[in-house]
Amino acid sequence: MFAYIIRRLIGAVVMLLLVSLVTFGIFFWLPKLAGQTTDQIAASYVGKAPTAEAIQDTKERLGLDKPVVVQYGNYLKALAVGKDYKAGPVTDHCPAPCMGYSFRSSQPVLETLLDRAPATLSLAIGAAIVWLGVGISTGVVSALRRGSVWDRASMIIALAGVSLPIYFTGLVSLALFSYTFKIFPGGGSYTSVTDNPLRWFEALVLPWVTLAFLYAAMYARLTRAGMLETMNEDYIRTARAKGLPERTVVTKHALRASLTPIMTIFGLDLGLLLGGAVLTENTFGIPGLGRLAIDSIRSGDLPMVLGVTLLTATSIIVINLIVDLLYAVVDPRVRLG
Amino acid sequence: MISATAGHSPAAWPNQWPDGRRYGALGAPIEVTGSDAEAQPEAVLVGVDKKKIQGRSLGQIAWMRLKRDKVALTGAIVVILLIVLAIIGPFFVQNPLTYHQNLIDPTYNRPKSGIWHTGISGDHWLGVEPGTGRDMLARIVHGARISLLVSFLATLTSVVIGTVMGITAGYFGGWVDYLISRTMDAFLAFPLLLFAIALVGVVSDGAFGLNGNGLRISVLVIVIGFFNWPYIGRIIRGQTLSLREREFVDAARSMGARNSYVLFKEVLPNLVAPILVYSTLLIPVNILFEAALSFLGVGVIPPTPSWGAMLTLAVPIYSSDPAYMIIPGMAIFITVLAFNLFGDGLRDALDPRAK
C-alpha cells in the first residue's frame, strides 16, 4: 500500500513535468517551428504598437533570447525554490511555488489562481453532488426495471443529454428561468460565498443543474450498463440463494461492483472540472479558472496559462490517485500492489 | 427484467466484446429503447427457418439486425440527409455573408418580423441573424459543412493513430505496451480543451505554408484528432490482447507467418467491427469538440459561419433575443443525436456476443 502510493506519486511528478513541458512547447517551441522569429514572438507579448526597444526589453525580461530548454529549466527552478525579480532598485521575491507574474496584469500567478479557485470549486463540487445523485440512482432504477416505461423514458432523456452542448442548454435555461420566468438571476451574477451565501447559492443553481444534467445523463447510462452486467454475475445469484434481502443484494453486492468503473470516470471528470469548467463558466459568466484560462490564452499571457494547465493537471492526477485508493475500499476484490 | 439464472444470456450483455471487456469508454454504452433487444436474437432465427442453414458473414447479420432497429435506422437516415445537405446544400441556399439590415429593428438589434422576432419569412426559412440580418438557413447549411468536414477528418486521424497504437501495444506487449499505455494515460490527464485553444491561438496567423480557414481547419482536425486517439487506442489494445491468444493466431504463427502478416491478415480484419462502431460514436464527440472550440472563438475565422460561433453570439443577447440560440443549438443537437443513435444501433448490430 505504502509502496504503491510512493510509486503513484513519482508517476504524478513525471506527469506534471510532461504537462508543463508540452504547454511550454506549445508557446515557445511551436511558434519557432511555425516559422516565427524570436522578435515576432516577443512582439506578440508586447501589445499593440511594439517598438524595437519594447521588443528587446520583453525579450530580456522573459528570457526569450535564451534556448527553450534553458527557459524551461528556469521555470522549474522558480517553481521549486522561488525566484527574485529585479524591478529597478527593488528586488521582488517570489516564494517557493513561484509561477511568475502575469504578462498582462503583473499580478503573481499563484495569487490570481487562488483568487479564482473558489468560484470553480463551488461550481464543480455542487454540480458533482447533483449529477452523482441523480445519475447513479436513475441508472440503478433503470437497470432494475429494464424495459419499463421509466427505463425507456429516462434512457431517451439521457441520450438527448449526452448529445447537448452545455453552452446551448445553459443559454436555454438562462432564457427560460432567468429572463422569462425571473426565478434565478442571470449570467454574470456570481457572488462569493463569504460575501453573501444566499446570492451565491441563487447564482449557482442554474449552472449546477445545467452542468449536472449533461453528466447525470452520461452517468445514468454508465450505471445502467454496469448494473445490468453485474446483476448477471454468479455472486449475485449466490447472494440471492443464501436468502439475502433484494435490497442488500442490490446495494451491497451489485452497486458496489458497478461503481468502480464509474469512479474512474468520475475522477477524470471532476479533476478536469476543478481545473476550470471552461464552457460553463463562459456561458454563465462565472469568474473561475476556466474563464481565466480562456482570457489568458486569448491575451497570450503565458505564465497564467501555464499556471492553470499545471493546476488542472495536478487536480486530475491527485483526484485519480484518491479514486484509485478508494477502489480498495469500495470493491473488496481490488488489491493495490 | 433480471433473471438470476440468466448467466450468459446474450441480450443482457449488450456492451461487451467476447473477452468480457466493457467498451463504454465514450460514454455511450447502452441501447436506446427495448426495440433492439427484441430485434436481435430472432433476426438470425427467422432467416434460419425460411432458408436452409447457411453461413452468414458478420456484415450480413449486422445488416439484418440494423434493418429491424427503427431508431438506429432513423438516425442513419438523418445522418445521410445531413451529409448530403453539407455537400450540396451550399449551392442552393443564399449567400451566408449578405447583410439584410432592412430586416433588423435598430432599437433592439433583432429581426423586426416573424414569430418570436426570428425574422422567419418566405425568403428566410429559418429567419435572419440579429444585428446583421444574414440568412440563418444559409449559415446553418454552411456551418454543417465545416462541422462535418472537421469531425470526419478528425475522427479519421484518431482512428488511424488509435488503431496503430492500440494494435501495436496489444500485440507486442512488454515495454512497448507499457510505453503506449502510459502515453494514453498521460493524454487522458491533459486539460485538452485548454491545450487545443492554446494551440489554435499560437498558430492563428499563418504557419506551415497555410493561412486563413485552410490553416484553421487543418489545425482543428489535427488538434481534435490527435487528442482523441487514446479512446480508440484503449479499445483496440484490449481487443488485440484477447485476439492475440486465439487459436487462429497461434495457427498462423505456427505455420511461420511473419508478425506483419498476422497483424494485417489475422488480427486487423477482426477489429473492423469495433473500429467501425467507435468511429461512428467518435464523430458526435468530435462535432461537439469542434463546436466547443468555435464557441470559444478558435474555430473557423468569421465571417465563415460555424454552429459554435453562432452560439457565442447568442450569449450576450439571450435576454433581448432568446429565440436566436435555438436554431444553431438544435442543429448541433440533431446532428449529434443522429450519430449517437446510429452508432448505438450499429454497435448492437455488430456485437458478436448477441448472436
Image: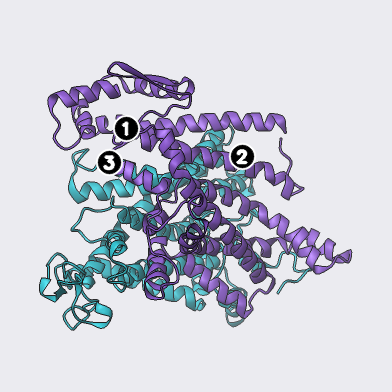
The 10 Å Cα crowd at callout 1, few under 14, some 14 to 19, many 20 or more, is few
**Residue type at tag 2:** Leu
Q: Which of marks 1 and 3 is nearer the N terminus?
A: 1
User: Residue at the spot x=57%, y=51% of the render?
Assistant: A265
**Residue type at tag 3:** Ser
The answer to whether the residues at label 1 and label 3 have Cβ atoms under 8 Å apart is no
**Residue type at tag 1:** Ser
Per the image, label 2 sits on a secondary structure element best described as: helix
- Distance from disc 1 to disc 3, alpha carbons, whole Å, reads 13 Å
Residue occupied by mark 3:
A299
Q: Which of marks 2 and 1 is in front?
A: 1
Front position in the image: A32 or B61: A32
Q: Are marks 2 and 1 on the same chain?
A: yes
Residue B117 falls left or right of residue A320: left
Chain coloured cyan: B
- Distance from disc 2 to disc 1, alpha carbons, whole Å, reads 34 Å
Q: Nearer the viewer, mark 3 or mark 2?
A: 3
Front position in the image: A226 or B197: B197
Residue occupied by mark 1:
A106
Give the percent coordinates (x, y) of residue A207: 46, 60
Residue B355 in view in this figure: no
Q: Which chain carries label 1?
A: A
Q: Chain A drawn in what color?
A: purple
Residue B322 falls left or right of residue B52: left
- Distance from disc 3 to disc 2, alpha carbons, whole Å, reads 34 Å
Q: Mark 2 lies on which chain?
A: A
**Could you say which disc has been placed on residue A321 in the image?**
2
